[in-house]
Amino acid sequence: MKTIFTSLLFSFVSLSSAFSQTTVDAKDIMAKINRKESISYQNATITGDLDLTDLANRKEVREGSWIGESQRFLSVVGVPLSFKNCTFKGKFLGYRTDKQEERRLLKMNSNKVYTTDFSEAVTIDGCQFADDAAFKYSTFSQRAIFTNNTFGDGALFKYAKFRNAADFSGSTFRDYADFKYTKFDESSSFQKVSFERYADFKYTKFDERVDFGQARFTNTADFKYTKLPRGTNFDDTRFSGSTDFKYTTLDGQKFSPNNR
């Protein structure tokens, strides 16, 4: 009986400890990344802005000019990231800008741009983004999984590059989903994704098949100039709002899902 009681007490203490550690400060995550520790959280609430543009390895990659050209800084996440069933209360930033007014002979706007690349696998599954999720210009070198998430505010993937497979299946975009000029080198999936506002895939390039099967576009769906490869799937995809497939191609041929 004593052994059973001890086991139950140990289990209770372990469970209580687990619950007491469900809130994590974003600064602690950044500190781990700077120490080159793999990141893995499950059922956690992340407080504060997770600003991955401000890592210890950040370096200047392009100087600004006197005529207003952007000054660029790059941080690199060199460890695997895994977040499952987590809630991000603040912003999740792989991109941000710092605009400053400079007084010179000619008054121009100086724009500092901070971006983040991911050299290892990224897994974000079943998570809630309460604020901005920004990955503009980011390069994902390994597999990128963004499945079953809810993006409550803007989701910015403009100019991002996915060098390996990318999966957004089952996710919901409640606000602007920006994939304009995004490049997918390998297969990608938006199966059963719900786009509740503007879905921007203008100029997006898919080198390998992409699956939009059973996706729902409630508002505007913009695929103008998008290049879709052979094998692309739009089975049971629903467009409830306006669509633009002008100059869209599938395997080099003019394409619109409404005219198949």
Image: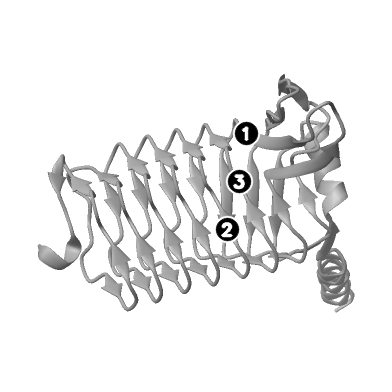
| Pointer 3 with pointer 1, Cβ within 8 A | no
Q: Nearer the viewer, mark 2 or mark 1?
A: 2
Q: How is the image coloured?
A: one colour
Q: Give the number of the disc on residue 135.
A: 3
Q: Give the number of the disc on residue 96.
A: none
Residue 129: % across, % down: 66, 65
Under mark 2, the amino acid is Ala
Which residue is under mark 1?
117
Q: Residue furthest left?
A: 260
Answer left or right for 219 relative to 37: left
Under mark 1, the amino acid is Asp
Which residue is under mark 2?
155
Secondary structure of the residue carrying numbered label 1: strand
Please determine whether, in this image, residue 136 is positioned above or below residue 237.
above
Residue 244: % across, % down: 29, 61
| Along the viewing direction, whichever of 85 and 260 lies nearer the viewer | 260
Q: CA distance from mark 2 to mark 1?
A: 17 Å
Secondary structure of the residue carrying numbered label 2: strand
Q: CA distance from mark 3 to mark 2?
A: 8 Å
Residue 67: % across, % down: 71, 26
Crowding around mark 2 (Cα neighbors within 10 Å: few <14, some 14 to 19, many 20+) is many
Where the C terminus falls, by quadrant? bottom left
